[in-house]
Amino acid sequence: MTSTAPETPARTAPDDRTTVVLITHNRRDELLRTLALLRRLPERPPVIVTDNASTDGTAEAVAREFPEMTLLRPGRNLGAVGRNLAVQRVRTPYVAFCDDDTWWAPGSLRRAADLLDAGPRLAGVTARILVEPEGTEDPVVPELRESPLSGPDWLPGPALGSFLAAATVLRTGAFRACGGFHPGLWLGGEEELLACDLLRQGWWLAYAEELTVHHHASRLRDSTARRVLGLRNTLWFTWLRRPLLPALRRTGHLIRTVPRDAASARAFAHATAGLPWVLRQRDPVPPDLERRLAALERARRNSPARRYVG
């Protein structure tokens, strides 16, 4: 039965603990829809938009229609590093990431801040993702809900080894202490390296079923280009942080299992071209963290959300 009780002032009043950060590139109409939904949130969060050199009038439309929001225009496409630029402006203890085609449900930012307040070693909480317009769960949600990692009893949900930038609230200080998103990865699975470094510093990440993010996939996405970047960055992360034998095994598994097509060939070519800088920055994790990464790798092999197709 749906409750008809009026919302309490505590649930409808603004909440000053969280800033929303998002990046965008040439998705003006979708971004404007997302910003309108964020504007209506009861928490009234500050919003910072980094426009990654859009050429479709995105920045001008944001400045005109959402003057209360902070607009950053770096003049070039920074990829995920555009989030780093925005977080430099954040003055709240928590930062909520979303994409130009995702938005937070009313009340979720407040609840995420409550969870982070209650867990001083909790770096971030990832929300349940609903795919619109059907309102069905994203295929990655079961993977989050059934995470193989164990964690302390005080975690609000299953312990995670990574997070999704489109659906996660992070502790601002922890993000900054780890340097944010690595500029070498640019975009595509860039969260995995940052998550690993957070875990290495003793932070925890968790899935929180009670939080909700909505995702209405953009019509302006190039799924093949995203696959190339995702596979390339998986390989780079593997060689940046995994010990030698696990890195070799992971690379071999990918060679055997990814589609044998031009996109995969480009991904491996780009990954090989970047090996000099990757090996210079290589810093393998200690055994206890490697055991967690190995458990995640095994669990993901059968996940429908982790197939390099498109």
Image (cartoon, rainbow, N blue to C red):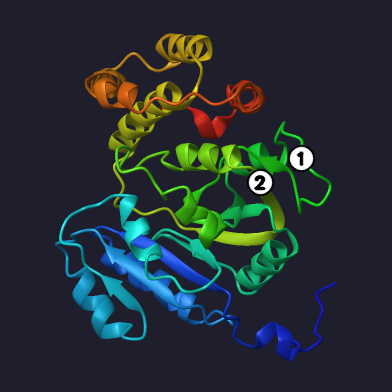
Residue at screen point 41% across, 26% down? 240
In the picture, the quarter occupied by the N terminus is bottom right
Asked if disc 1 and disc 2 are in contact, CB closer than 8 Å, the reply is: yes
Q: Which mark is residue 151?
A: 1
Residue at screen point 24% across, 84% down? 64
Q: Is residue 120 above or below residue 31?
A: above
Residue at screen point 55% across, 44% down? 198
Instruction: Identify the image quadrant of residue 108.
Output: bottom right
Depth order, front residue of 91/167: 91
Q: In the rendered view, does 256 fall on the left or right side of 232? A: right
Q: Secondary structure at mark 2?
A: strand
Residue 266 pos. (x, y %): 24, 22
Q: Is residue 224 above or below residue 178?
A: above
Residue 174 pos. (x, y %): 54, 54
Q: In the rendered view, does 124 fall on the left or right side of 194? A: right
Q: Is residue 25 above or below residue 200?
A: below
Q: How many numbered circles does the render carry?
A: 2
Instruction: Identify the image quadrant of residue 210.
Output: bottom right
Kindly identify the amino acid type of the residue bearing the numbered disc 2: Trp
* Circle 2 Cα neighbour tier, 10 Å, few/some/many (<14 / 14–19 / ≥20): many
Q: Which mark is residue 211?
A: none
Q: Which mark is residue 204?
A: 2
Residue at screen point 37% across, 65% down? 88
